[in-house]
Image (cartoon, rainbow, N blue to C red):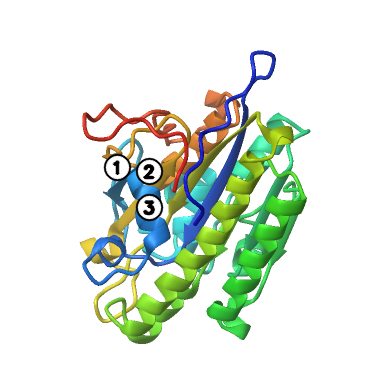
Amino acid sequence: MPLPRPALVPGPDRAAQGKVLVVGMDGLRFDRLTGRQANAPVLHALMAAGAHGTSLLPYGEADGQADDGPSTSMAYTDSGPGWSSALTGVWPDRHGVTGNDFAGADYARYPDFLSRAVTARPGLRTAAVVSWPELVRRGVLGAAIGRRVHYDGESDGYGAADRLVARTAERWLTEDDPDVLFVYFGATDEAGHTTGPLSPAYGHALLAQDTHLGRLLDAVDARRSDPRRADEHWTVLVTTDHGHLDTGGHGGDTRAEQEVFVILAEPGAHGGTRLDTPRLIDIAPTVLDRLGITVDPVWGLQGRALPRHSPTSPTSPPTSEWP
């Protein structure tokens, strides 16, 4: 990662232009990210520069009760329900996805946040690139998105597919002008299933994804160093969809499977502070908020926008960028 540089602040005649990068890391257990053996310097630096927190999914085999809604319809702690919740801003009782078969999905009523954004503001440039092709094939990421690219981690292996995802996202950030970009990496989940989250293979997958994230942040940092883009105000969100049992696998209602995290970094944040139980359904309204799009109550979103600035900490002065 480059050394920190002074933040580029818009001039008096230029309003800040909100842009958002959301990075999903499938099946990444928070304790493996933060434990002594964790090797994820980019993610650790992002947490130190911004804010982060954890919460528990309100579902997992047994019928659950959402904090602010009805039954979550016996959803499994699987990727289908998890990414549907993160992308749409509602729990399975509304988006309808309770497993990886995607049966009952209602993305017409509850579309992903990129589709919401471009529908509300047609001029926005939206893009998504993923290594789990089901996110595109099943319509989780809708056709309204300006660019949708999927690589096949199921067939080609997620390590190889994730590298292609990172390369594509880095190129878009360098050569094009996206307003909101969703990027998905799947190698940690693959390793979690194959050898468990306590294995060296899982640690290697985490480091690879961490390195990919670093390339994306470098590309964003380079944009902010370009005087032509001095009005860009980038928010970065990193999250996961579920955890894993020590032995590998998920779908149930243990804490290891239900715990998810959100990392939020943006100009003006106080570094190293905690978010108050951020939920997957908070991702979508946060993205819309940072883009300057007001959430219409008719949309029925269950999440809330995460605070723009973390509470002041006497040991953590405000930072205008990540390392």
When asked about the image quadrant of residue 73, the answer is bottom left
Residue 127: image x %, image y %?
69, 51
Report if residue 31 is visible in the image: yes
Residue 244: image x %, image y %?
31, 71
Q: Amino acid type of disc 3?
A: Ala
Residue 283: mark = none
When asked about the image quadrant of residue 159, the answer is bottom right
Q: Is residue 244 above or below residue 92?
A: below
Residue 33: image x %, image y %?
31, 63
Tell me which label, 1 or 3, sits earlier in the chain: 3
Residue under numbered circle 1: 272
Residue under numbered circle 2: 49
Q: Are marks 3 and 2 in contact (CB under 8 Å)?
A: yes
For the residues labelled 3 and 2, the Cα–Cα distance comes to: 6 Å
For the residues labelled 1 and 3, the Cα–Cα distance comes to: 9 Å
Residue under numbered circle 3: 45
Towards the viewer: 122 or 323: 323
Give the residue displayed 43% in from the left and 36% down from the top. Answer: 302
For this orientation, the residue located farthest to the top is 12
Q: Amino acid type of disc 1?
A: Gly
When asked about the image quadrant of residue 14, the answer is top right
Towards the viewer: 196 or 1: 1
Residue 120: image x %, image y %?
69, 30
